[in-house]
Amino acid sequence: AQSVTQLDSQVPVFEEAPVELRCNYSSSVSVYLFWYVQYPNQGLQLLLKYLSGSTLVESINGFEAEFNKSQTSFHLRKPSVHISDTAEYFCAVSGTSYGKLTFGQGTILTVHP
Amino acid sequence: DTGVSQDPRHKITKRGQNVTFRCDPISEHNRLYWYRQTLGQGPEFLTYFQNEAQLEKSRLLSDRFSAERPKGSFSTLEIQRTEQGDSAMYLCASSFTEGAGDTQYFGPGTRLTVL
């Protein structure tokens, strides 16, 4: 079985500041790791995922996440946030052959002008 | 590619009534998932289909819940004798098999309110 803990339920930050959203997971098997984003009044969208290879993965809008196996973490970072990054972010893991996702509780990122 | 669609988007019902939700996945996606999300929580897995076969059901899915995916296309989720605790957002997702780690595409959800 897998579990995911997102350490911050809410993260307020000013525009152009850096941000880190923390995610820790627990699993008895190898996992695949995901960050999904939910913008206001929209459905969940994949932001980025780690399957194998380089432990640093990037999204098209400037976010990056690093898989740390020893610390069982997959923290999400962005060096400079925009107002449009305001959303709820979910970390998720999959450890099964068919991709069932186990989600964390979510982190609400609010970017202030 | 029109994305995953769900119908209805909102459903208000009285306790004890039956409700049915529909999910239309992205065409040619062979995997279909149902999740449930309550306020302040992340989505929780309910059940999974590969084509028309239902391959796993969560313990969250009591006997009052049933899901089908006839012909491996759209899926329905029925809740019988609804309870107030069933109030939640019901999410459908689909994916195309790439082995483990395939990207799931989510629909907008059906928000159920049980009075």
Image (cartoon, rainbow, N blue to C red):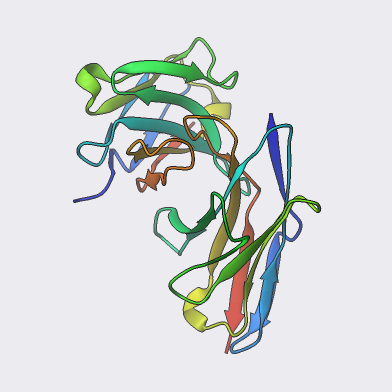
Residue at 35 percent of width and 39 percent of height: B95
- In front: A18, or A69? A69
Q: Residue furthest top?
A: B63
Vertical placement of B106 versus B77: above or below? below
Q: Is residue A27 above or below residue A78?
A: above
Q: Is residue A30 visible?
A: yes
At 53% from the left and 19% from the top, the residue drawn is: B61
Tell whether A25 sits left or right of B84. right
Residue A36 appears in view:
no
Q: Position of residue B28 (x, y in %)?
A: 21, 36
Give residue B42's position: percent from left, percent from top. Answer: 59, 45
Q: Which of the two residues, B104 or A12, is positioned nearer the viewer here?
A: B104
Q: Position of residue B100 (x, y in %)?
A: 48, 37
Rendered image quadrant of residue A76? bottom right
In this rendering, the count of numbered labels is 0
Seen at 29% across and 26% down, the residue is B75
In the picture as drawn, the residue positioned furthest to the right comes out as A71
Front in this rendered view, residue B19 or A102: A102
Q: At x 58% / y 28%, what residue is drawn? A: B85
Q: Position of residue B111 (x, y in %)?
A: 42, 41
